[in-house]
Image: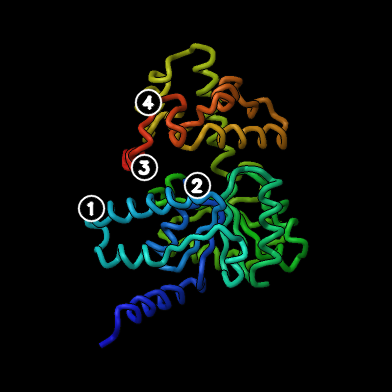
Amino acid sequence: MQSAVQHLARRTLATAASHGVQRVGVIGAGQMGIGIACVAARNAKVPVMVMDMNQAQLDKGLKYIDAVLQKDVSKGKMTAEDRDHARSLVTATAKLDDFAQTDFLVEAVSESLELKNKIFSDLAKITPADAILASNTSSISITKIAAATGSHARAQNVIGMHFMNPVPIMQLVEIIPGLATSDATLQKTLALAHAMGKTTTTSRDVPGFIANRLLMPYINEAVFALHEGIGSKQDIDTTMKLGTNMPMGPLTLADFIGLDTCLSILKILHTQLGEDKYRPCPLLQSYVDAGWVGKKAGRGFYEYNTDNLLKAAEKK
Protein backbone atom coordinates (compact mmCIF):
# COMPACT_ATOMS: atom_id res chain seq x y z
CA MET A 1 0.00 0.00 0.00
CA GLN A 2 1.35 3.39 -0.98
CA SER A 3 2.45 5.38 2.06
CA ALA A 4 0.99 8.80 2.84
CA VAL A 5 4.40 10.39 2.29
CA GLN A 6 4.72 8.82 -1.18
CA HIS A 7 1.17 9.91 -2.02
CA LEU A 8 1.85 13.53 -1.07
CA ALA A 9 5.15 13.52 -2.95
CA ARG A 10 3.47 12.24 -6.12
CA ARG A 11 0.77 14.93 -5.88
CA THR A 12 3.40 17.65 -5.47
CA LEU A 13 5.50 16.41 -8.41
CA ALA A 14 2.45 16.17 -10.67
CA THR A 15 1.47 19.74 -9.88
CA ALA A 16 5.03 21.02 -10.32
CA ALA A 17 5.09 19.55 -13.81
CA SER A 18 2.29 21.91 -14.87
CA HIS A 19 4.34 25.06 -14.22
CA GLY A 20 7.90 23.76 -14.09
CA VAL A 21 8.68 25.16 -10.63
CA GLN A 22 10.14 22.72 -8.12
CA ARG A 23 10.53 24.96 -5.07
CA VAL A 24 9.46 28.51 -4.23
CA GLY A 25 11.34 30.80 -1.88
CA VAL A 26 9.77 33.91 -0.36
CA ILE A 27 11.88 36.65 1.21
CA GLY A 28 9.88 38.53 3.82
CA ALA A 29 7.21 37.13 6.16
CA GLY A 30 5.06 40.24 6.30
CA GLN A 31 1.44 40.31 5.16
CA MET A 32 2.40 40.09 1.47
CA GLY A 33 5.17 37.51 1.73
CA ILE A 34 3.24 35.14 3.95
CA GLY A 35 0.22 35.44 1.68
CA ILE A 36 2.35 34.53 -1.33
CA ALA A 37 3.70 31.51 0.54
CA CYS A 38 0.15 30.48 1.39
CA VAL A 39 -1.10 30.42 -2.22
CA ALA A 40 2.08 28.74 -3.43
CA ALA A 41 1.38 25.84 -1.09
CA ARG A 42 -2.44 25.86 -1.10
CA ASN A 43 -3.11 26.46 -4.79
CA ALA A 44 0.08 25.67 -6.72
CA LYS A 45 0.90 22.82 -4.31
CA VAL A 46 4.62 23.50 -4.51
CA PRO A 47 7.09 23.36 -1.59
CA VAL A 48 7.75 26.88 -0.31
CA MET A 49 10.27 28.26 2.16
CA VAL A 50 9.70 31.65 3.81
CA MET A 51 12.72 33.63 4.96
CA ASP A 52 12.68 36.40 7.55
CA MET A 53 15.32 37.38 10.10
CA ASN A 54 12.57 38.25 12.58
CA GLN A 55 11.51 34.99 14.26
CA ALA A 56 8.43 36.59 15.80
CA GLN A 57 7.32 37.70 12.34
CA LEU A 58 7.86 34.19 10.99
CA ASP A 59 5.82 32.69 13.83
CA LYS A 60 3.03 35.20 13.27
CA GLY A 61 3.03 34.49 9.55
CA LEU A 62 2.85 30.73 9.94
CA LYS A 63 -0.09 31.14 12.32
CA TYR A 64 -1.79 33.23 9.65
CA ILE A 65 -1.35 30.43 7.11
CA ASP A 66 -2.80 27.96 9.62
CA ALA A 67 -5.80 30.25 10.10
CA VAL A 68 -6.38 30.69 6.36
CA LEU A 69 -6.23 26.96 5.69
CA GLN A 70 -8.50 26.13 8.61
CA LYS A 71 -10.99 28.75 7.43
CA ASP A 72 -11.00 27.10 3.99
CA VAL A 73 -11.79 23.76 5.63
CA SER A 74 -14.61 25.23 7.73
CA LYS A 75 -16.12 26.79 4.58
CA GLY A 76 -15.91 23.51 2.68
CA LYS A 77 -13.33 24.85 0.21
CA MET A 78 -10.80 22.13 1.02
CA THR A 79 -10.59 18.89 2.98
CA ALA A 80 -8.64 18.39 6.18
CA GLU A 81 -6.26 16.18 4.18
CA ASP A 82 -5.66 18.97 1.67
CA ARG A 83 -5.11 21.41 4.53
CA ASP A 84 -2.48 19.16 6.08
CA HIS A 85 -0.80 18.64 2.72
CA ALA A 86 -0.64 22.39 2.02
CA ARG A 87 0.73 23.12 5.48
CA SER A 88 3.38 20.41 5.14
CA LEU A 89 4.73 22.21 2.08
CA VAL A 90 5.55 25.39 4.04
CA THR A 91 8.83 25.74 5.91
CA ALA A 92 10.64 28.73 7.39
CA THR A 93 14.21 29.95 7.72
CA ALA A 94 16.18 32.96 8.91
CA LYS A 95 19.03 32.43 6.42
CA LEU A 96 19.15 33.52 2.79
CA ASP A 97 21.72 30.79 2.13
CA ASP A 98 18.98 28.18 2.50
CA PHE A 99 17.73 29.16 -0.97
CA ALA A 100 20.77 27.59 -2.66
CA GLN A 101 18.59 24.92 -4.32
CA THR A 102 15.48 27.04 -4.94
CA ASP A 103 14.44 27.68 -8.55
CA PHE A 104 11.82 30.43 -8.08
CA LEU A 105 12.28 33.27 -5.59
CA VAL A 106 9.82 36.02 -4.71
CA GLU A 107 11.09 39.04 -2.79
CA ALA A 108 8.40 40.69 -0.65
CA VAL A 109 10.14 43.26 1.55
CA SER A 110 9.42 46.97 2.02
CA GLU A 111 9.52 49.45 -0.89
CA SER A 112 13.20 50.37 -0.65
CA LEU A 113 15.36 50.16 -3.77
CA GLU A 114 18.49 49.93 -1.63
CA LEU A 115 17.14 46.96 0.33
CA LYS A 116 15.85 45.18 -2.76
CA ASN A 117 19.15 45.72 -4.59
CA LYS A 118 21.03 44.14 -1.68
CA ILE A 119 18.71 41.12 -1.66
CA PHE A 120 18.90 40.57 -5.42
CA SER A 121 22.67 40.96 -5.40
CA ASP A 122 22.90 38.29 -2.70
CA LEU A 123 20.39 35.99 -4.41
CA ALA A 124 22.38 36.14 -7.65
CA LYS A 125 25.35 34.70 -5.77
CA ILE A 126 23.40 32.07 -3.81
CA THR A 127 20.72 30.65 -6.10
CA PRO A 128 21.08 28.40 -9.18
CA ALA A 129 22.09 30.27 -12.34
CA ASP A 130 18.71 29.63 -13.97
CA ALA A 131 16.59 30.53 -10.93
CA ILE A 132 13.87 33.11 -11.52
CA LEU A 133 14.11 36.10 -9.20
CA ALA A 134 10.77 37.90 -8.86
CA SER A 135 9.97 41.06 -6.94
CA ASN A 136 6.62 41.86 -5.38
CA THR A 137 7.41 45.56 -5.67
CA SER A 138 4.38 47.75 -6.25
CA SER A 139 6.20 50.69 -7.83
CA ILE A 140 9.99 50.29 -8.19
CA SER A 141 11.58 49.70 -11.60
CA ILE A 142 12.20 46.02 -12.32
CA THR A 143 15.02 47.03 -14.67
CA LYS A 144 16.79 48.82 -11.79
CA ILE A 145 16.34 45.84 -9.49
CA ALA A 146 17.60 43.45 -12.18
CA ALA A 147 20.77 45.51 -12.60
CA ALA A 148 21.72 44.63 -9.02
CA THR A 149 22.28 41.00 -10.07
CA GLY A 150 25.43 42.12 -11.86
CA SER A 151 25.04 40.36 -15.20
CA HIS A 152 22.73 40.15 -18.19
CA ALA A 153 22.48 36.39 -17.70
CA ARG A 154 20.91 36.91 -14.27
CA ALA A 155 18.97 40.06 -15.23
CA GLN A 156 17.02 38.11 -17.86
CA ASN A 157 15.64 35.95 -15.04
CA VAL A 158 14.33 38.94 -13.04
CA ILE A 159 10.66 39.92 -13.25
CA GLY A 160 8.00 41.81 -11.32
CA MET A 161 5.22 39.80 -9.71
CA HIS A 162 2.93 42.28 -7.95
CA PHE A 163 0.35 40.51 -5.78
CA MET A 164 -2.65 42.27 -4.23
CA ASN A 165 -3.45 42.28 -0.53
CA PRO A 166 -4.80 40.02 0.97
CA VAL A 167 -3.00 37.57 -1.30
CA PRO A 168 -5.05 34.44 -0.40
CA ILE A 169 -8.25 36.24 -1.47
CA MET A 170 -7.42 38.79 -4.17
CA GLN A 171 -7.46 37.29 -7.66
CA LEU A 172 -5.00 39.54 -9.50
CA VAL A 173 -1.24 39.44 -10.03
CA GLU A 174 0.41 42.16 -12.08
CA ILE A 175 3.34 40.80 -14.10
CA ILE A 176 6.08 43.27 -15.03
CA PRO A 177 8.94 42.26 -17.34
CA GLY A 178 12.04 44.43 -17.08
CA LEU A 179 14.15 45.57 -20.02
CA ALA A 180 16.24 42.39 -19.93
CA THR A 181 13.54 39.88 -18.88
CA SER A 182 13.45 36.87 -21.19
CA ASP A 183 10.27 35.41 -22.66
CA ALA A 184 11.06 32.11 -20.93
CA THR A 185 11.07 33.90 -17.57
CA LEU A 186 7.79 35.63 -18.41
CA GLN A 187 6.06 32.40 -19.47
CA LYS A 188 7.20 30.45 -16.42
CA THR A 189 6.09 33.26 -14.12
CA LEU A 190 2.68 33.41 -15.78
CA ALA A 191 2.30 29.64 -15.43
CA LEU A 192 3.11 29.74 -11.72
CA ALA A 193 0.75 32.67 -11.11
CA HIS A 194 -2.05 30.80 -12.85
CA ALA A 195 -1.28 27.69 -10.79
CA MET A 196 -1.66 29.91 -7.72
CA GLY A 197 -5.21 30.55 -8.87
CA LYS A 198 -4.56 34.10 -10.05
CA THR A 199 -5.63 36.12 -13.06
CA THR A 200 -2.68 38.00 -14.54
CA THR A 201 -2.22 41.30 -16.31
CA THR A 202 1.04 42.48 -17.84
CA SER A 203 2.36 46.01 -17.41
CA ARG A 204 5.25 47.95 -18.86
CA ASP A 205 8.05 48.66 -16.41
CA VAL A 206 6.96 52.19 -15.47
CA PRO A 207 6.51 53.81 -12.02
CA GLY A 208 3.48 52.32 -10.27
CA PHE A 209 2.73 49.94 -13.16
CA ILE A 210 -1.01 49.79 -13.91
CA ALA A 211 -2.57 49.29 -10.47
CA ASN A 212 -0.81 51.92 -8.41
CA ARG A 213 -0.55 54.45 -11.23
CA LEU A 214 -4.35 54.61 -10.97
CA LEU A 215 -5.00 53.66 -7.34
CA MET A 216 -2.56 55.86 -5.41
CA PRO A 217 -3.79 59.23 -6.75
CA TYR A 218 -7.32 58.12 -5.81
CA ILE A 219 -6.28 57.28 -2.25
CA ASN A 220 -4.14 60.41 -1.97
CA GLU A 221 -7.04 62.63 -3.08
CA ALA A 222 -9.25 61.01 -0.44
CA VAL A 223 -6.66 61.87 2.22
CA PHE A 224 -6.57 65.45 0.90
CA ALA A 225 -10.38 65.56 1.17
CA LEU A 226 -10.09 64.57 4.83
CA HIS A 227 -7.17 66.95 5.40
CA GLU A 228 -9.12 69.88 3.93
CA GLY A 229 -12.28 69.09 5.89
CA ILE A 230 -14.38 68.37 2.82
CA GLY A 231 -15.97 65.44 4.65
CA SER A 232 -15.48 63.10 7.59
CA LYS A 233 -13.61 59.85 7.03
CA GLN A 234 -16.90 57.96 7.26
CA ASP A 235 -18.61 60.22 4.74
CA ILE A 236 -15.68 60.06 2.31
CA ASP A 237 -15.60 56.27 2.47
CA THR A 238 -19.38 55.85 2.31
CA THR A 239 -19.66 58.20 -0.67
CA MET A 240 -17.11 56.27 -2.69
CA LYS A 241 -18.23 52.83 -1.52
CA LEU A 242 -21.93 53.26 -2.25
CA GLY A 243 -21.68 55.93 -4.92
CA THR A 244 -19.24 54.02 -7.12
CA ASN A 245 -20.06 50.45 -6.01
CA MET A 246 -16.62 49.86 -4.48
CA PRO A 247 -16.12 47.03 -1.94
CA MET A 248 -14.59 49.53 0.51
CA GLY A 249 -13.88 53.24 0.73
CA PRO A 250 -10.46 54.74 -0.11
CA LEU A 251 -9.43 55.46 3.48
CA THR A 252 -10.34 51.96 4.62
CA LEU A 253 -8.44 50.60 1.64
CA ALA A 254 -5.41 52.73 2.52
CA ASP A 255 -5.45 51.32 6.05
CA PHE A 256 -5.63 47.83 4.64
CA ILE A 257 -2.72 48.38 2.23
CA GLY A 258 -0.66 50.18 4.88
CA LEU A 259 -0.26 53.95 5.02
CA ASP A 260 3.51 53.59 5.00
CA THR A 261 3.28 51.58 1.79
CA CYS A 262 0.97 54.16 0.21
CA LEU A 263 3.36 56.95 1.19
CA SER A 264 6.38 55.12 -0.23
CA ILE A 265 4.64 54.50 -3.54
CA LEU A 266 3.45 58.10 -3.82
CA LYS A 267 6.95 59.39 -3.15
CA ILE A 268 8.32 57.18 -5.91
CA LEU A 269 5.61 58.33 -8.34
CA HIS A 270 6.14 61.98 -7.43
CA THR A 271 9.93 61.76 -7.73
CA GLN A 272 10.05 59.80 -10.96
CA LEU A 273 7.11 61.38 -12.79
CA GLY A 274 7.47 64.89 -11.37
CA GLU A 275 3.75 65.68 -11.36
CA ASP A 276 1.95 67.42 -8.48
CA LYS A 277 -0.95 64.98 -8.63
CA TYR A 278 1.35 62.40 -7.02
CA ARG A 279 2.53 64.71 -4.20
CA PRO A 280 1.68 62.93 -0.92
CA CYS A 281 -0.85 64.66 1.29
CA PRO A 282 0.81 66.11 4.44
CA LEU A 283 -1.78 64.30 6.58
CA LEU A 284 -0.62 60.96 5.18
CA GLN A 285 2.96 61.81 6.14
CA SER A 286 1.82 62.80 9.64
CA TYR A 287 0.00 59.51 10.18
CA VAL A 288 3.04 57.54 9.11
CA ASP A 289 5.29 59.66 11.35
CA ALA A 290 2.97 58.86 14.26
CA GLY A 291 3.16 55.14 13.56
CA TRP A 292 -0.52 55.03 12.58
CA VAL A 293 0.13 53.01 9.46
CA GLY A 294 -3.13 51.10 9.22
CA LYS A 295 -4.65 47.78 10.15
CA LYS A 296 -1.32 46.01 10.69
CA ALA A 297 -0.47 48.53 13.44
CA GLY A 298 -3.95 48.56 14.97
CA ARG A 299 -4.55 52.16 13.94
CA GLY A 300 -4.64 54.21 10.77
CA PHE A 301 -7.59 56.32 9.74
CA TYR A 302 -9.60 53.81 11.79
CA GLU A 303 -8.80 51.64 14.82
CA TYR A 304 -8.57 47.85 14.52
CA ASN A 305 -8.51 44.70 16.61
CA THR A 306 -5.23 43.11 15.52
CA ASP A 307 -5.95 39.85 17.35
CA ASN A 308 -8.18 38.59 14.55
CA LEU A 309 -5.90 38.28 11.50
CA LEU A 310 -8.70 37.25 9.17
CA LYS A 311 -11.40 39.72 10.20
CA ALA A 312 -10.78 42.36 7.54
CA ALA A 313 -9.83 39.80 4.89
CA GLU A 314 -13.19 38.05 5.19
CA LYS A 315 -15.23 41.22 4.71
CA LYS A 316 -16.26 41.97 1.15
Identity of the amino acid at label 4? Answer: Gly
Label 3 Cα crowd, 10 Å radius (few <14 / some 14-19 / many 20+): some
Of residue 239 and residue 1, the one placed in the foreground of this image is 1
Identity of the amino acid at label 1? Answer: Lys
Quarter of the figure with residue 2: bottom left
Residue assigned mark 2: 30
Residue assigned mark 1: 75
- Residue 309: mark: 3
Mark 1 or mark 2, which is nearer the start of the sequence? Answer: 2
Identity of the amino acid at label 3? Answer: Leu
Mark 4 or mark 1, which is nearer the start of the sequence? Answer: 1
Q: Could you tell me if residue 284 is visible in this image?
A: yes
Q: Position of residue 238 (x, y in %)?
A: 37, 23
Under circle 4, the secondary element is helix
Under circle 1, the secondary element is loop
- Residue 243: mark: 4
Mark 3 and mark 4 residues within 8 Å of each other at the beta carbon: no
CA distance for labels 3 and 4 = 29 Å
Mark 2 and mark 3 residues within 8 Å of each other at the beta carbon: no
